[in-house]
């Protein structure tokens, strides 16, 4: 089953341990509007969806289900990391990936 925008919004809210009121306040919308988004009875406009993506530091593609990668490529730290990675030779890339895998297992 394909993930919906509402499903993604609910999952992100719960992962971040936010109440409907808390996330609605952060997004400058009513609790009812947020609830409608989560239940897919209404969808945010593109500008609001972009605001929500920035709140959770994920991409619009993630919110709309186009990708399962939950990061925002506009994030400055992500850009720096990717820029550094792309400047590395293959041996450096392999060493970095091995180190990252070790850190993730801890």
Image (cartoon, rainbow, N blue to C red):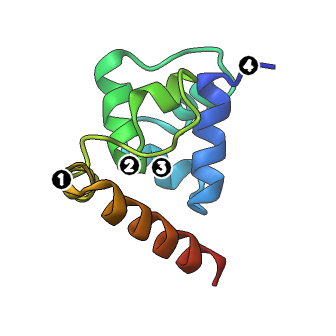
* Closer-to-camera residue (27/59): 59
Dot 4 alpha-carbon crowd within 10 angstroms: few under 14, some 14 to 19, many 20 or more: few
- Quadrant of the snapshot with the C terminus: bottom right
Q: Which residue is drawn at 38% across and 49% down?
A: 57
Residue 91 visible? The answer is yes
With respect to residue 24, does 48 lie above or below? Answer: above
Q: Which numbered dot is residue 57?
A: 2
> Marks 3 and 2, how far apart in space?
14 Å
Sequence-wise, the earlier of marks 2 and 1 is 2
The residue labelled by disc 1 is 87
> Marks 2 and 1, how far apart in space?
25 Å
In which quadrant of the rendered view does residue 91 lie? bottom left
Q: Which numbered dot is residue 100?
A: none
The residue labelled by disc 4 is 2
The reply to whether discs 1 and 4 touch (Cβ–Cβ < 8 Å) is: no
* Closer-to-camera residue (89/8): 89
Q: Which of marks 3 and 2 is in front?
A: 2
Image coordinates of residue 39 in percent, x first then y, are 69, 25
The residue labelled by disc 3 is 23
Sequence-wise, the earlier of marks 1 and 4 is 4
Q: Residue at x 57, y 78 (%)?
A: 102
């Amino acid at each position: 089953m394909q993930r919906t925008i509402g499903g993604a919004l609910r999952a992100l809210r719960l992962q971040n341990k936010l109440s409907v009121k808390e996330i609605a306040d952060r997004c400058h919308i009513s609790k009812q509007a947020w609830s409608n988004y989560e239940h897919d009875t209404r969808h945010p406009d593109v500008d609001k969806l972009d605001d929500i993506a920035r709140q959770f530091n994920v991409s619009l593609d993630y919110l709309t289900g186009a990708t399962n990668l939950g990061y925002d490529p506009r994030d400055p730290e992500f850009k720096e990391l990717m820029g550094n990675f792309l400047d590395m030779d293959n041996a450096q890339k392999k060493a970095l990936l091995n180190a990252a895998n070790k850190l993730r297992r801890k």
